[in-house]
Image (tube, rainbow, N blue to C red):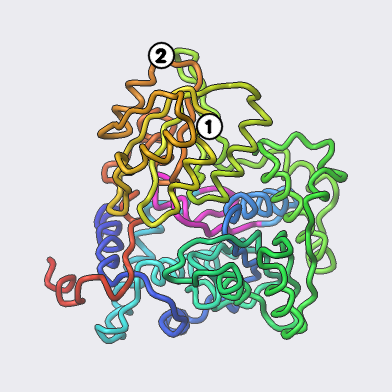
Amino acid sequence: MTYSEAIQFLYGLRLFGAKFGLDNSFKLAELTGNPQNRLRFIHVAGTNGKGSTCAMLEGIYRAGGLRVGLFTSPHLVSFRERIQINREFVSEADVVRHVERLKPLLKEFPDDHHPTFFEAVTIMALNYFAEQKCELVIWETGLGGRLDATNIVVPLASVITNIGIEHSEWLGDTVEKIAAEKAGIIKPGKPVITAALPGHGLEVISAVARERHSPLTNVSPSQATQPPLDIIDLPLHGPHQRLNAALALSAVRVLSAQIQVNDTALRIGLAKVDWPGRMHRIQTHSGQTVLLDGAHNPDGADALRIALEEEFPGAKPVIIFGVFRDKDSSSMCHSLAPLAGRILLTPVHSERTEDPAKLVAACRESNPDAPIEVCSSLAEALQKAAKVPFVVIAGSLYLVGEAMELLHVAGVLETDEKKLNEWVPAEKSPPPSVWKSKP
């Protein structure tokens, strides 16, 4: 099997859709020797900021001398981004090896309970981290928490960044229902650290923590400017990232009796944190500033608005915006459009893209003075904005990943691995026989 064939095999698993439940993950883990039992985890859930918080935790513990695994999703460009050790992507050879190991085990499952792409990749990651003897794994959920494939581990601590409305068809249509799903990662007696706010999920998280006798630490926005964060020049910009940093610091302190990290490692880990696609600034050869941010829901768009107003007061950038049709795009437009001097609306290179023409009305309502254009692609939008000094690209991590390729920030891959991020609910996916008939 070549790497391209391994990626194609994983892509084929998309046809089994995405679904909630832990049975497949537990069974597949057992078939591979339960690698999760040989690892230590910090499990991270939440609506926004999961990836950034994971990157900060990873950076702190790596600066402290540990061998740290990092599991996140989605990826921006390469599938290999999802599975890292000390910020080195899993190698192509290791991807091939673990796919080959997993492939025959999938035959142990009936067609109507076949493992999904995410379930398979989750177990691949566990086996890779165990094989590579990681001393700690920073473990991000996919969707939700309670029935997410990652929730077969018993972590040292659970971290819940915040709660907002997202994936309502899966997690529920209220903050309380979504908070209950995210709080499902809390394990009996294990500490939980959260930056959720009163009225925005904190009460639900607190209730679950009490029920499970799990010590709860709540991180407030005021802690984002307390020592040592008041003197650390955080590479990830915006007030929301300082709050994520406070959350990561709090988690490290809660676990200090189990994993000691000195103050120097704390400062170095945060000062050197790198997480592409979040307030990610690029200077092009022509001197243009392009800012990429994967704001993909209303809370994320509002956080980007606040960060732009703080860091670029009075600026009127060209905003290139594309979003998925299952998002509250109107709210996102209302947050971002008023900042723009010009708005270019583009489709996201995904089956789930919203028609950019449907975004015009919300943008015009929020900023009647800005010229608004509908583009056929991100490439066209970038071409139209080529001579503008400041451009912001936002609305989806998928859009950010495409921009990184077009702007040559990331290498161009032989195949478009961003397609591996696509998923549909299991009930809407083709029957397994379709997949099995493929060569």
Q: CA distance from mark 1 to mark 2?
A: 21 Å
Query: Badge 2 local density, few (<14 within 10 Å), some, or many (20+)?
Result: few
State the image coordinates of residue 255 (x, y, percent, origin top left).
79, 66
Which label lies toward us, 1 or 2?
1
Q: Is residue 31 above or below residue 181?
A: below
Residue 82 covered by magenta stretch: yes
Q: What residue span does the magenta drawing correspond to? A: 67-88
Query: Badge 1 local density, few (<14 within 10 Å), some, or many (20+)?
Result: many
Looking at the rendered structure, the kind of residue marked 1 is Pro
State the image coordinates of residue 340 (x, y, percent, origin top left).
50, 27
Q: Within the image, what quadrant is residue 104 found in?
A: bottom left
Q: Is residue 316 above or below residue 65?
A: above
Residue at 61% x, 72% y is 176
Mark 1 and mark 2 residues within 8 Å of each other at the beta carbon: no
Q: Within the image, what quadrant is residue 312 found in?
A: top right
Q: Which residue is mark 2?
A: 387
Q: Secondary structure beneath disc 1?
A: helix
Name the quarter where the C terminus is drawn. Answer: bottom left
Looking at the rendered structure, the kind of residue marked 2 is Lys
Along the viewing direction, whichever of 423 and 29 lies nearer the viewer: 423
State the image coordinates of residue 74 (x, y, percent, origin top left).
45, 54
Horizontal relation, residue 89 to residue 275: left or right: left
Circle nearer the N terminus (1, 2): 1
Residue 84 covered by magenta stretch: yes
Residue at 58% x, 54% y is 48
Q: Which residue is mark 1?
A: 338
Label of residue 74 in the image: none
Q: Secondary structure beneath disc 2?
A: loop
Name the quarter where the N terminus is drawn. Answer: bottom left
State the image coordinates of residue 61 (x, y, percent, origin top left).
71, 54
